Image (tube, grey):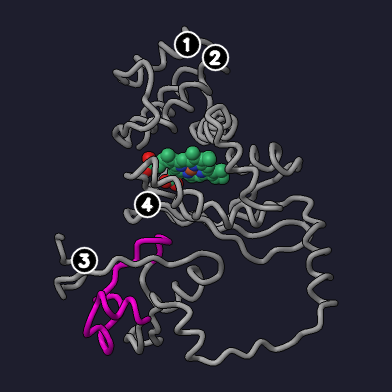
Amino acid sequence: MYGLLLEAMFDALRERHGDEILEEIRVAANIEQHEFIMHDTYPEEVAIRLANAVSMATGGRVNDIMTHFGFHFVSFTSRYGYDFMLKVLGRNLRDFLNGLDSLHDYLRTSYPKLLPPSFFSENETKDGLIMHYRSKRKGYTHYVMGQIQKVAIMFYNTEVEIEMLEVDESAKGTHCVMKLHFDNRGFEHDLKQKLVRPKAPLEIKNRVLLDAFPYHIVFGRDMVIKTLGKSLMQLVKDASGKRVDHVFEMVKPPIDFTFDEVCHSAFISSIAVSRFCRCQRTPTSCSK
Ligand code: HEM
């Protein structure tokens, strides 16, 4: 895990409990570092050990401590000028959440080993929306809740109440569904605007559409590839007729590579990125 997150956690503790208590917690958590370098990586367990040590020292619940860490993270990153990126991520909270995957993708340029979370929102109403959070990690759902509450206050001047609907934590990571309750009246306005606009069918010929996306993959419910975009075809020859999950690997969003999951998650808001394997073995059995 990158030092940026860990240093933000230290900073949250310093601000709330002072230097002396932070030092006691650091020793109790068996953490060697007195500070973390933003762009260096550290073992994943450090954050978990830290949250547990804080809980032992203060009697607070680990979930609340993680919420506090997430809340603090947003203002912490502002010190490094990242608030400029966050301010332009969306005109409203829904667009902001849907933009987070692109933000983390972009951050790969400065954090190349980033293991990013993935978000998308759906079922928006004037009172809120449903948000899906996915991660290869476990233990960050309350952290996310704190981040969202802080973002809502800081950039949208609104309070959010978060209701956890489903949490699925397994060896594969986390998939969490949350209902975000907030004053989302702007949504009704957007909806009305859409309704008054005349509905003119947009007719685009298949060929034009497919040419416009030279890296597209078309596959059916049986997962068999029907066609590939021109540029992708140059890279992976003979893929037509093979199972898409035998030739490509789902990298982002972190979902199971099944037809239903792809339809449900990937195309609602974010782009599915797949890594392909040149050695014709299935991506999972390939060590390259
Ligand atoms: C511009 C501001 C931001 C920066 C620079 C940033 C950067 C990062 C970095 C470096 C990581 C560590 C990943 C790793 O070590 O593999 C991370 C993880 C994470 N980020 Fe961001 N991030 C930002 C904003 C946000 C916001 C606004 C949210 C949510 C509302 C968010 C949600 C998360 C979560 C939940 C994780 C880690 C846990 C997981 O794997 O799910 N980030 N971010």
> What distance separates the C-alpha of mark 2 from that of mark 1?
6 Å
Q: Position of residue 166 (x, y in %)?
A: 53, 57
Q: Quadrant of residue 187?
A: bottom right
Q: CA distance from mark 3 to mark 1?
A: 46 Å
* N-terminal-most mark, 4 or 2: 2
In screen coordinates, is 244 left or right of 76? left
If you read the primary sequence from the N terminus, does the residue marked by circle 3 or circle 1 appear first? Answer: 1
The residue carrying pointer 1 sits among few (fewer than 14), some (14 to 19) or many (20 or more) residues within 10 Å by Cα, namely: some
* Residue to which mark 1 is pinned: 21
Side (left or right) of 285 relative to 14: left
Q: CA distance from mark 1 to mark 4?
A: 32 Å
Identify the residue at the far top of this view. 20
State whether label 4 is within 8 Å of ligand 1.
yes
Going by the numbered disc 3, the residue's amino acid type is Thr
SS of the residue at dot 4?
Answer: loop
What amino acid does circle 4 point to?
A: Lys
Q: Which residue is mark 2?
A: 17
Identity of the amino acid at label 2? Answer: His
Q: Residue at x 35, y 82 (%)?
A: 230
- Is residue 238 highlighted in magenta? yes
For label 4, the residue is 136
Pointer 3: what residue? Answer: 284
Asked whether the beta carbons under mark 2 and mark 1 sit within 8 Å of each other, the answer is: yes
* Residue type marked 1: Ile
